[in-house]
Amino acid sequence: MLAGRRVVLGVTGGIAAYKAVEVCRRLVDLGAHVVPVMTEDATRFVGEVTLSALASEPVQRSLWREQDPIPHTALGQQADLVVVVPATARFLGTYAAGISDGLLAATVLATRAPVVVCPAMHTEMWEHPAVQENLATLRRRGVHVVEPGSGRLAGGDVGTGRLADPVDIVAAVTARLARSGGADLAGVTVVVSAGGTREAIDPVRFITNRSSGKQGHAIADAAAARGADVVLVTTVARPVPAGATVVRVDTAAEMADAVLAAAEHADVVVMAAAVADFRPAVAAPVKLRKTDGPPQLVLEPTVDILAELGRRRRPGQVLVGFAAETGDPEERALQKLRSKGADLVVANDVAAPGSGFDGDTNAVTIYGADGRRTVVGLSSKGEVAGAVLDRVVACRAARGPDDVTPPTRSDP
Ligand code: CTP
């Protein structure tokens, strides 16, 4: 699965360093060429010999090697991916600040390959604003953060900060490599809807919502970059991916027509648009006058496009919905997953800092009809798009293109 892929495995000095050994073994089992790099502190927690024996080549620790004066450049340039397990608060700080204080820090600065960091530390450190701000900086720059879990920590304390499970770390690495491999959606037709619809009251006024379309366009961009044939149905004038078929629409009815038609030939449909649930039953043909008094708006429901897609689903087609909620979105997201027949629902709390409508970041949880959930902490909308498409790819792989069975609906 990872044959021919070169992974630099960075290990920094935290108690969870012993779990890097398990990550190393699993990556090697999947066929990756694993290049281990340890910080000096890491060697206090796990034996260099152990990692050297399990990895594809001996551990490297120093910037100062006689036979190779600039080891970090080669490590960074040749890597297909760099993963840091565990990533201590100190490592995250030096990386965010761009300080190359050792071989590993120099390597992550010298690479253009994707970087995955897996933080692990005590809860107090994890929650410290300095650490969270460093993580936000790294996320904004496209670094993938595998969030720590909650559980028993060193010294017997219990809380957030425990290194993610090695299985989940390897899954994140595999997904990121598939993405950077470039073509895991080659030949796949992906329809994406984006933006908020506008429902006319009269020729000059309309009802709309705060959607900027940025998340939907980011999904279209990411899908195109991964080789998909993209059809983008959008209400907003934003840049579109080269080669995509773009359909500009305004109203929920126009969006329904365009999406349902495109979906007849699609393998994946992502409903990122904020579609009006109701529209004025009659739009006044001429501008309403103030002197006529407050208009009595009679509203009627629009077509629920996602639910309709669920009813018309083609064999093997993957359907993705969004749930922008205020407050904890879990319950409503799970309910939408079931009621609309979607495979995935991407939920966010639009009232939470950094995950509102018009920003460049988002924080989401992706709920699957298979019971799996993926938490994507505050990240760029491009990074969120990548995580959504990773789950789409996983759905397609699990189902197979000719499988006509609808997804099993179970609560996690
Ligand atoms: N959606 C749709 N057609 C509609 C309304 C919503 O396809 N007429 C899609 C959205 O694009 C999104 C998902 O359904 O992917 C959830 O949208 P949301 O507005 O959150 O859900 P609603 O079913 O409208 O429920 P509510 O507004 O009560 O939360």
Image (cartoon, rainbow, N blue to C red):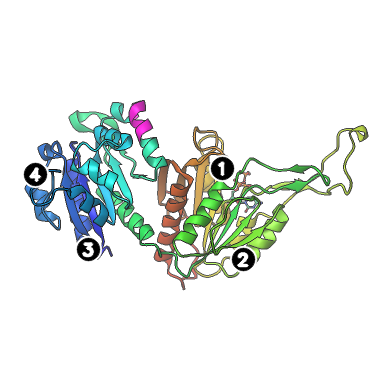
Q: Which mark is residue 324?
A: 1
Which of the two labelled residues, at mark 2 and mark 1, occupies the earlier sequence position? 2
Secondary structure found at label 2: helix
- Asked whether residue 411 is in view, the answer is no
Q: Residues within 10 Å of mark 4 (few under 14, many from 20)?
A: some
Q: Residue at x 72, y 47 (%)?
A: 198
Q: Which mark is residue 173?
A: none
Q: Which mark is residue 47?
A: 4
Secondary structure found at label 4: loop
Q: Residues within 10 Å of mark 2 (few under 14, many from 20)?
A: some
Using residue 385 as the reference point, say whether residue 326 is left or right of it: right
The x and y percentages for residue 127 are 34, 28
Q: Which mark is residue 262?
A: 2
129 drawn magenta: yes
Q: What residue span does the magenta drawing correspond to?
A: 127-134
Secondary structure found at label 1: strand
How far is the residue under mark 4 from the one under mark 2? 56 Å
